[in-house]
Amino acid sequence: MQKRLVVKNAVQENAWRRAACRALAALAALMSIQGAQAAPVFPGGVEIRRTTDGVPHVLASDWRGLGYGYGYVQAQDALCTMAEAFITFEGRRAAFFGADGRPAINSTFGRPANSELDFFFRAHAGPAMVNAARAAQPEPLSQMVAGFADGYNRYLAEARAGAADADAAAPAAACLKQPWVRAISADDIYRRMYAASIAGGYARFIAEIANAQPAQAVAGAAGRGAEGGLAALLAPRVGGEVGLGSNVIALGQRASGGDGAVLFGNPHWYWGGPDRFYQAQLTIPGKVNVAGVSFLGIPVIMLGFNDHIAWSHTVSDARRFGLFELSLTPGLPTSYRYEGRDEPMEQTSVAIEVLGADGVLREQRRTLYRSRFGPLIDLGQQNAAFGWSAQRALAVRDVNADNFRIFRNFFYWAEARSLDDFIAIQRREAALPWINTVAIGRDDGRVWFSDIGNVPNVPDQLRAACTTELGQAFAGFDAAVPFLDGSRAACGWRVDPRAAQPGAMATADMPGLLRDDYVANMNDSYWLSNPAQPLEGYPRTMGGERRALSLRGRYGHLLAQSLLQAGARSSLALSRRAMDAVLEPRSHAAELFKNGLLDGACNEAGAAPVDGLTDACAVLRNWDNRAATDAPGPLLWGAFWRRVDKIPDAALYRTPFDAAAPLTTPSAVNGADPRVRQALVDALGDLRGKGWAIDAPLGDVQFVRAGGRHAGVFGGCSAAGYFTIACARGPDGSLDALAEGNSYLQMVRFGPDGVDARTMLAHGEDERALAGGPGAAPLLRYARKEWLAFPFSEAAIASDPQLTRRVLLP
């Protein structure tokens, strides 16, 4: 394979440039001979075909070559994003960006300070972790990892030498000369994989782990922070944003007239940053042929399809970490009691480099602490009761910190030949870190839902026997997180010989469901994957049962049931009907509650008049409850509902949640509550403060900058009950790299000729696209609701009207 190339000086650079030009000339001649025919796979070489919307199809003869091509194309489209991520996972942000700066874009590890990220990754993603991760992978996957790093380096070297084609070289211009853009190794890919693995655990608490320090030995010390922030910290399952998640619906043979299953998958995810999705097809003839998406820097497809199975994921409601209360040795804040004896904490001195304001690098050291359960964590900044005091401290255990099976699970899925094969791999590996799975198979009318992966083995009986008084208080913030007594061996996570690792649940004890009508999940727990067959009796750590669904969840089930009852005569007809239905930007909150809320908020009897309120009421009453780009009303409704939704359910709804009617309760909104009127008044002021007219069409504010124009985007934020998600995080309402929402969408069925997939990648492949640069075609496609017929077969690829080819020779 291509050796890593590092250009060290001008002489080497010029020599490489001349050699590259000769190679490219030879390739051009070769391609002119090949014309529209499929190029041969050269021994050790890689062919990259790009089709409509710039989607790469990587064709290789071996696993290293497959990784090589995938690393190359990801670097072509996202070099600057990936380069910054690699120095983050190495623990070197402060050396280039200073100690106090933060990542500009959110991700699964949030936006801690650079120094906090560095201390964390230096302590947790060092050589020991890398070696353990490498040792756990099958040899073909290890080859893909190594090849991915080499392919990334090949592109970087070409871009720096000026030998890449003009369009591919352009995205590197903003960062190519930056000192933090460097060649990588396989170690960088293993660190990147680790960062994704811990998104449901350690990555949620990077600052709290990196800053955990013993309190001064002062009796009665109880933390350092103010009250009120812990609930906000714990609310998201991953990534620091409550709205992150997904929709997935799988419709079985009862919905398609006996003609097989249909899968709709739609993660609501980051539009920019290191964890955004990248779409591709990866092929070794006779071995693997899989398409879909992965995070940037990941060498395997994480969500997608092959010619036999299709799958998608949603963020799981199960907790992937637990807390242990440590009773500290009197006078020794770094020692704790365990089984009647004093046990000292492990202390590790961690050094990072910090760039000062004067441009000088200086070393900064900090001691980080670890117990037998895991690292120390200080939640005192969120709630003083949970800080590191002279009497007690908290340790956190992440079940995925030692789970190196995750990406080999995806690797094996790429080769799965049936739905049964897919399920068997999932049960064997027990690897999935923080996601639910829904899948279908070819020539199979069944649909599969599961929350089977890696979850702490904490039965409810153990929780009841070992939760401390402080743990009971913590349950008021999150009752599903295990919070156990760290002084007793009997209170450790249970070890089950059937499980894939110590302290994890056995897959036989986790929820899974096969049906022939439908299964669905919209980030609620496993409980109602299908309301006709509730899944019950699982430990509280799995997320919970008999609790109210989100409005998006309620709507998703109603949508699935309407498709089931519509009586499609084939999977083709069903998929085409579903393609329209899943993009309807309806607000279920408005459909259910708008009229009742307005009856109270717009009632002027006995209320002080408010300028503009009558007009606001008229706008909302005339709105059809859809977040279409030309609709006046969605902007005002979003500002109104965000405030209404903060009213406690007991006051907002006259009919409370009923587990016997989960799709219709709570209901009967109480519009007479004075907080409802105030919410509308405040929403009116919010829009005025931003300079937006109360009847402004949604597309005037919610748009993407695509190819020199503004294109309005439909949908809204999850909290307002939208199924189609578009949620801006910037101040002006436009959708840029800070946005979150519908990201990758796939509608998949299997016909007589194999897989039939329709896809969209809302933010596109190219990191420049959302800033108005090249690569905007996928953005415009999504704004038009125009599904792409994915060219999976060789014939479809060869006939694609935008096909380009390049062969990378070793």
Image (cartoon, rainbow, N blue to C red):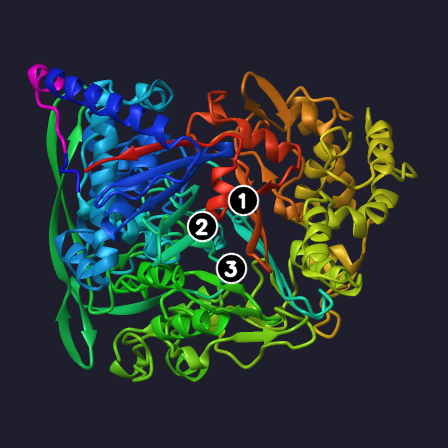
Q: Position of residue 289 (x, y in %)?
A: 40, 54
Q: How many marks?
A: 3
Q: Is residue 640 visible?
A: yes
Residue on which disc 3 sits: 310
Give the distance between the C-alpha atoms of the residues marked 3 and 1, in whole angstroms.
Answer: 14 Å
Classify mark 1: residues with Cα within 10 Å, few (<14), some (14-19) or many (20+): many
Residue on which disc 1 sits: 790
Q: Is residue 198 visible?
A: no
Asked whether the residues under the numbered discs 2 and 1 touch, taking CB atoms below 8 Å apart as contact, a structural biologist would say yes
Q: Position of residue 703 (x, y in %)?
A: 61, 27
Task: Return the residue nearer the eye: 402 or 468.
Answer: 402
Residue on which disc 2 sits: 291
Residue at left 78%, top 45%?
A: 674
Counting residues from the N terminus, which is met first, the one under dot 3 or under dot 1? 3
- In the image, the segment drawn in magenta is 5-13
Residue at left 37%, top 59%?
A: 410
Residue 508 versus residue 806 in the image, above or below: below
Residue at left 83%, top 41%?
A: 601
Residue 761 versus residue 203 in the image, above or below: above
Residue 6 among those drawn in magenta: yes
Task: Return the residue nearer the eye: 316 or 137.
Answer: 137
In-image side of 613 versus 168 (left or right): right
Q: Amino acid at mark 2?
A: Ala
Locate the C terminus and report the quarter of the image it occupies. Answer: top left
Classify mark 3: residues with Cα within 10 Å, few (<14), some (14-19) or many (20+): many
Asked whether the residues under the numbered discs 2 and 3 touch, taking CB atoms below 8 Å apart as contact, a structural biologist would say no
